[in-house]
Image (cartoon, rainbow, N blue to C red):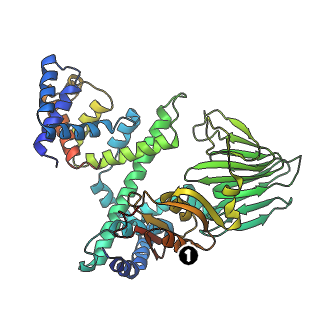
Amino acid sequence: MSNNIFEVFYTSHYFWLRSYLVRKFKCQHQAADVTQDTFIKLLNHSNLSELAQPRAFLTTTATRIMIDMIRRRHLETTYLQFLQLSKSEQFVDSPEQLAIAVESLVAIANMLDSVSPKAREIFLMNRLDGMKHAEIAVHFGISIPRVRQYLAQVIVKCCSVSEL
Amino acid sequence: MKDPNHIEQAAAWKTLLTSGEVTVAEQQAFETWLNEDLEHKKAYKIVEKFWDSFEHLDPASAKSALLDMPSKKKITMGIKASLSVFLAAVSMWALVNSSIGDHYLADYSTTAGEMRDLVLDDGSRIKMNTGSAIDIAYSGTSRLIKLRQGEIVVQVAKDLTRPFIVETEHGTAQALGTQYLVKTVAGSTSVAVIESIVKVCTAGGYFAHKRIECLNLTPATGVAEIKPGMQANPVDVDEITAWTGGYLSFESAPLSTVLHELERYVPGKIYFDSASIGDLDVSGVVPVTDIDRAFAMLSKLLPISIQRYPYLTVVERKAGSEERK
């Protein structure tokens, strides 16, 4: 994309988008962050000049970024809280390890989005709790082949939307 | 490309192989499947990558976080229903916990590109670098400087009865009459000593059961990060205090490192694609009190173009310059 088109696009919408988000967020800084992330995301968009409704497009993109931000924060907080509750002395995660863990969590959460709640629970019981197929089958009152179907289905869905 | 059929097969194999009930025959059948087609291998690799992405998570905490996770749809509905209420709460959170909030609540702060000199009651001096924020708490028994974010150089006036301490969330650095530099950026704190001796200790907080660890630093040494197991390393005092003279000095530093450093001196963000500028190095002195000049220099020295917008600077490699050595 030519820099010129982006420049025109940026200068004609930057302040509008920021003030729009300030009204929504009631916070200057949050709004400034989301505004920037929005434009960065559009930096390599090929048809900026041909958008029929650039501002509608901008608010949609900004909303998506906002949702991701809220999700990330939610995952991070919950994960950290449980970590602190459950961990004994010998285990203290470094900030780097935590950051890597949160990145993985966000990626996994995005992939699990397309999966039904039941399938998700079965998968996490197996992958994270280490429950055997037979144990899960008993827990849900279903057959072992059915459990395997669920597990495989989750893997397939996650891998077809994979960000990894 | 991903073939859905291959992924399905790979997923079925992975499910079987992790069941703990694989027969020798099944194991052999898997090997045969895997080796009969390169696409099978690729598909299985994708599945394994997904499977292994859970590896460095604490299982119980991750499960709670993921099961508790509202879907994107729910968040969208939530935003539409009570946008102002929810986001006001977020901004409160930001005000209390983030570096931005810290900035506004601090006694003294500098904005991007700003530097500031302070002379304290006892004659001690503090030089604040860009984007820094500090609180000053002098009492009858101690002189405490709380560095909320950024970088400072302190020159401490002698006072045997009141220790001079710089504190960050990561730990403390206590002067025994001296000049030193404390920097807290990107989630860690570093300390470097210019004169005399400084005692550096890790913080007890956050995970309250952490043991506090201390280390004495002599001149021209420092710790890169205050944390358990930290060690003293030699530092180049001129290089790390160069900013007090208004410039940064680099010695064959990757351009991405230079841009990350400069980002602290620019309002907003610097955007660049690390992959495309990965091979570019910078050696020399870059002015930071005149950031326009700094960018002009960089774009003259290197095959890059720099566009500046309000709160956003975009650095790109010039087209066709990849081949050049």
Quick one: A109 or B129, which is closer to the camera?
B129
In the rendered picture of this protein, how many numbered marks are placed on residues? 1
Residue A118 occupies which quadrant of the picture? top left
Q: Is residue B46 left or right of residue B175?
A: left
> What secondary structure is found at the residue carrying circle 1?
helix
Residue A78: in sight, yes or no?
Answer: no
The residue depicted at 38 percent of the width and 79 percent of the height is A7
Q: Position of residue B253 (x, y in %)?
A: 54, 56
Q: Position of residue B64 (x, y in %)?
A: 37, 38
Q: Is residue A129 left or right of residue B291?
A: left
The residue depicted at 41 percent of the width and 45 percent of the height is A102
Report crowding for label 1: few under 14, some 14 to 19, many 20 or more residues within 10 A (C-alpha): few
Indicate the quadrant containing the C terminus of chain B: top left, top right, bottom left or bottom right.
bottom left
Q: Position of residue A53 (x, y in %)?
A: 26, 78
Residue B65: in sight, yes or no?
Answer: yes
Q: Chain of mark 1?
A: B
Q: Position of residue A113 (x, y in %)?
A: 26, 49
User: On screen, A10 above or below A37?
Assistant: below
The residue depicted at 14 percent of the width and 22 percent of the height is B28
Q: Is residue B267 left or right of residue B51?
A: right
Residue type, label 1: Asp
Residue A136 occupies which quadrant of the picture? top left
Q: Residue furthest top?
A: B24
Pointer 1 residue:
B292
Q: Residue furthest front?
A: B325
User: On screen, A13 above or below B132?
Assistant: below
Q: Is residue A67 left or right of residue B262?
A: left
